[in-house]
Amino acid sequence: MDKYDVSLILACFNEEQIFEDSVSRIIRTLDQTDYTWEIIFVDDKSQDGTRTLIAKMIKRYPRKNLSAIFHKKNLGRGQTVKDGFKKALGRIVGYIDIDLEVGEWYLPKFFAAIEAGADLASAWRIYDFKLKTLHRWLGSKGYVLLRKALLGLPFEDTEGGYKFFKRAKLMPLLKQSYHSGWFFDTEIMTLAFRAGLKVVEIPTAFVRRTDKTSTVRLVPDTLIYLKNLLSYSYRHGKNH
């Protein structure tokens, strides 16, 4: 029996700079819907004041359904999201990046996609092209081409941290997931596609924030991503 209409997982790691503003905006948007909802914060052992801010936010809204999981050691973004999913009690479950580079105003659109019959609604990020971020844009396009070739997925964007699922369809997939880092996004989309789930990609504006310190390390994280893709495709490629 589902306790809520929606469970939103917010994975947190050193989010002190943007936490209060982002969460306030998310709560305001959820309150404008007709859905019952919960937010589950999962902190992946932040080194700044994020844990204190989470506790304060829960105390600030005692009548709202806010809860938290605090990792004792850093386990990776994928594991952080999965731990939140396992605690979730919503009919619709999902996660968004707390920096809101894809805005909170898209939330109702994703809920509507699930209500309309999708098993998974995933963001297709449309980038605000800038010359200084050309290397990121090229890297993203290159990954899409390589991922399509190796895994045979028809999707335009598997890596976006803005995804919602029918909980009943998601839970069996989690038992097959073993990636704990950023590659989880590609893995869960692959598992959904292979399981025959109805996947809808929703175009969204992606606006990079300049008022926060990014936790993404472009070169090492890209190399890790490629290593994981090659390893995963060797075992689970489109010919498997």
Image: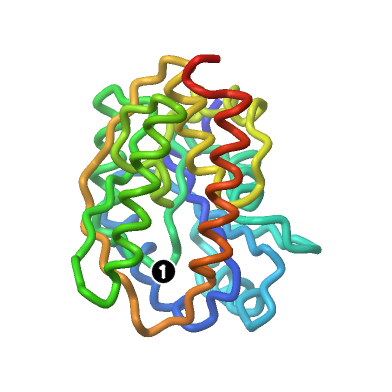
User: Does the image show residue 237?
Assistant: yes
Residue located at (33% from left, 66% from top): 135
Is residue 103 found left or right of 86 in the rendered image?
left
Please, which residue is most extreme toward the right here? 72
User: Does the image show residue 66?
Assistant: no
Give the position of the N terminus as an image quadrant.
top right
Q: Nearer the viewer, residue 65 or 207?
A: 207
Q: Nearer the viewer, residue 207 or 88?
A: 207
Q: Position of residue 86 (x, y in %)?
A: 64, 39
Q: Quadrant of residue 232?
A: top right
Please determine whether, in this image, residue 236 is positioned above or below residue 74. above
Q: Quadrant of residue 115?
A: top left
Figure colour scheme? rainbow
Which amino acid does the dot numbered 1 rest on? Asp
Q: Position of residue 207 (x, y in %)?
A: 26, 68
Name the residue beneath numbered marker 1.
99
Q: Badge 1, how many Cα within 10 Å: few under 14, some, many 20+?
A: many
Secondary structure, mark 1, is loop
Residue located at (54% from left, 72% from top): 215
Please determine whether, in this image, residue 158 is positioned above or below residue 28. above
Is residue 127 found left or right of 240 in the rendered image?
left
Give the position of the C terminus as an image quadrant.
top right
Q: Nearer the viewer, residue 67 or 105?
A: 105
Q: Position of residue 36 (x, y in %)?
A: 40, 44
